[in-house]
Image (cartoon, helix red, strand yellow):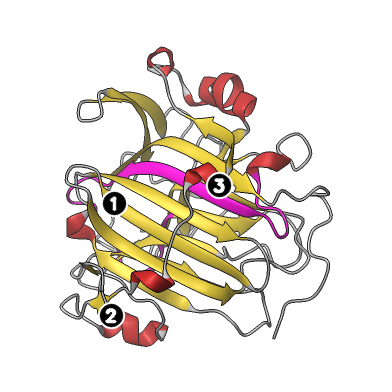
Amino acid sequence: MAYGTVYHTITACNKSNVMKRPFAFLFFLFFAGYSISAAAEYQLMGTLVPEEKHIGWKYDALHRDFFRGIGFDYTEHPHCTGIGGHMDGVHLAVVKDDVLNKPVLQFDIHITPVMDGDRCGGTDRQRNELKSATNNTTWAKLQGNWDEWQRLEWKMKIPKGFQPTQAFCHIHQIKAQDGPNNGAPVITVSLRANRDGSNKRVQIIHASSGGSGRSIGTFAEAPLSEFEDEWVQVVQEIHFRHNGSYSVKMTRIRDDKVLLVVSQNNIDMWRRGATFLRSKYGIYRSLAGGDLRNNPVGQSPLLKNESIYMTDFRIYEKNTNPNPTSGDPGRALR
């Protein structure tokens, strides 16, 4: 029996146990039971790759004249008038990256000079996210529709010193657009730390539909230090149904080191009552005890201004649903 390289991977475990285990406990991944399909098996449905001409564009021009035309949406941000809004702030920009030698997206979230909120609505959290278009007619090919397979690829760089808290900080979500169970994401890539800021880590978290009883919770994590100031290639493979599957592989580009790899089969990858699921990218984090309605706000003292960089988004699909607006034909498996 041949085993692959040792990775920071947890393939099936209780969430409370994961949170307690130090990174010294590593797990072997048996490759006979794990694979991410080659892109050749899929059809490329859409891309988002910033260009030199986009450098200097403001957020509204990026949304109106770039993202919308290729099936993406940038409307969940602090550019609003109200509590937690900052119309004059810079929250998304296209900048030149010296390592990749190409333009990339820079997402920013702020504690100062204005503490960002959640679209001038939510007061206990901050949101700055790009997502696939919330339109399942014109842009159905970019969405996760019932029984389809998607392969999602993108590159990300988390700057050195990025400080999560013990509360949530999502940098990627797979989430239902509609239906009665669209509150919680199905999958998140999250950053988290202990209450004192130590043990910083990248997590993969799963949550099933309400009442299905099949949430896995945190099922993989790796030290954030392995990711800091490094470009990382992320590849996900998803089968969108209640007894679906999910795989992710994160590879550091500089040296091809696999930082995290995990696969889960027969898990709930849908939301009851949903028409489709879509992907989100950026920074969505809790104020960790704070509330913008309070003075002082009372957020975690760990929180500070943060940035994250992303580029080369690619969406592939196979087993295309011929009637993508039909949604879930049945109830969640129990």
Q: Residue at x 27, y 47 (%)?
A: 158
| Location of residue 248 with respect to 181 vertically, above or below | above
* Residue 1, numbered circle: 2
Q: Residue at x 41, y 75 (%)?
A: 218
**Helix, strand or loop status at disc 3:** helix
Q: Is residue 136 magenta?
A: no
Q: Would you say residue 292 is visible in this rendering?
A: no
Residue denoted by label 1: 251
Residue that sits furthest to the front in the current view: 1
Residue placed most toward the observer, 54 or 112: 54
Residue type at mark 2? Answer: Met
Residue denoted by label 3: 41
Q: Position of residue 240 (x, y in %)?
A: 65, 61
The disc, 2 or 3, on the residue closer to the chain's N-terminal end is 2
What is the distance, in whole Å, between disc 3 and disc 1 at their CAs?
A: 21 Å
**Helix, strand or loop status at disc 2:** loop
Q: Residue at x 36, y 39 (%)?
A: 108
Residue type at mark 1? Answer: Thr
Mark 2 or mark 3: which is in front? 2
Q: Quadrant of residue 136?
A: top right
Q: Position of residue 156 (x, y in %)?
A: 33, 43
| Location of residue 68 with respect to 124 vertically, above or below | above
Magenta residues? 143-171
The disc, 3 or 1, on the residue closer to the chain's N-terminal end is 3
